[in-house]
Every structure is written in structure tokens, then in C-alpha cells.
Image (tube, rainbow, N blue to C red):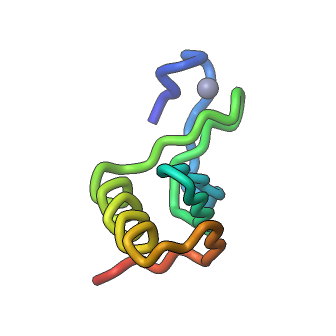
Amino acid sequence: MKCTICKHGETKLGVTTITLEKGNSTIVFKEVPAQICDNCGEKYIDKATTKDLLNKAREIVKNGVEVDIRKYEKVA
Ligand SMILES: [Zn+2]
């Protein structure tokens, strides 16, 4: 798809690292699938993946973990 930020680049499927901060917790997800602009580098993560990330983050925060770095694994 065409990038909506720079309006020049095309996005390509790739993986990225997402950092979420909630309260005292920092959660880093590696290898999150995303559409990435080949021009400006803007990342587009689909709604289902975003929701999944937030759910996972909520679980981690609930367990009182301050820093968590993990590889993202999509649930089927
Ligand atoms: Zn762009």
C-alpha cells in the first residue's frame, strides 16, 4: 500500500520492534509483523496485532514485571 505519511513510499511486509510503556513497566516486542514504508520508515501494524500486543502487555503488567523483552508470537 502507499504510505499515508510521506505519500511517496510503498509499504512492504517486514518485522519491527515495538516498545510499550505502561505505568512502571516497559515491554519490548521483537519481530512484530508490520508494513514498513521503504521511503520514510513509517510502520503500520494491523488492528488485530495491535490488540494482541496490548493484551499481552496488560498480562505482563499485571504480573508486576518492570522490563520484559520478548519475541512476538502471534496467537492463531
Ligand atoms: Zn512513508
Work out whether residue 61 or residue 11 is closer to the camera in this orientation and state it.
61
Q: Residue at x 61, y 19 (%)?
A: 8
- The answer to whether residue 52 is above or below residue 44 is below
Asked whether, in this view, residue 11 is left or right of residue 53, the answer is right
Q: Quadrant of residue 28?
A: bottom right
- The answer to whether residue 49 is above or below residue 46 is below
- The answer to whether residue 61 is above or below residue 39 is below
Q: Residue at x 45, y 73 (%)?
A: 60
Q: Quadrant of residue 10?
A: top right
Q: Please, which residue is most extreme toward the bottom here?
A: 76
Asked whether, in this view, residue 53 is left or right of residue 25, the answer is left
- The answer to whether residue 44 is above or below residue 20 is above
Residue 19 location (% of width, % of height) = 60, 53
Residue 11 location (% of width, % of height) = 56, 40
Work out whether residue 60 or residue 5 is closer to the camera in this orientation and state it.
60
Residue 6 location (% of width, % of height) = 60, 17
Work out whether residue 2 or residue 25 is closer to the camera in this orientation and state it.
25
Q: Residue at x 55, y 73 (%)?
A: 65
Ligand 1: give its quadrant. Answer: top right
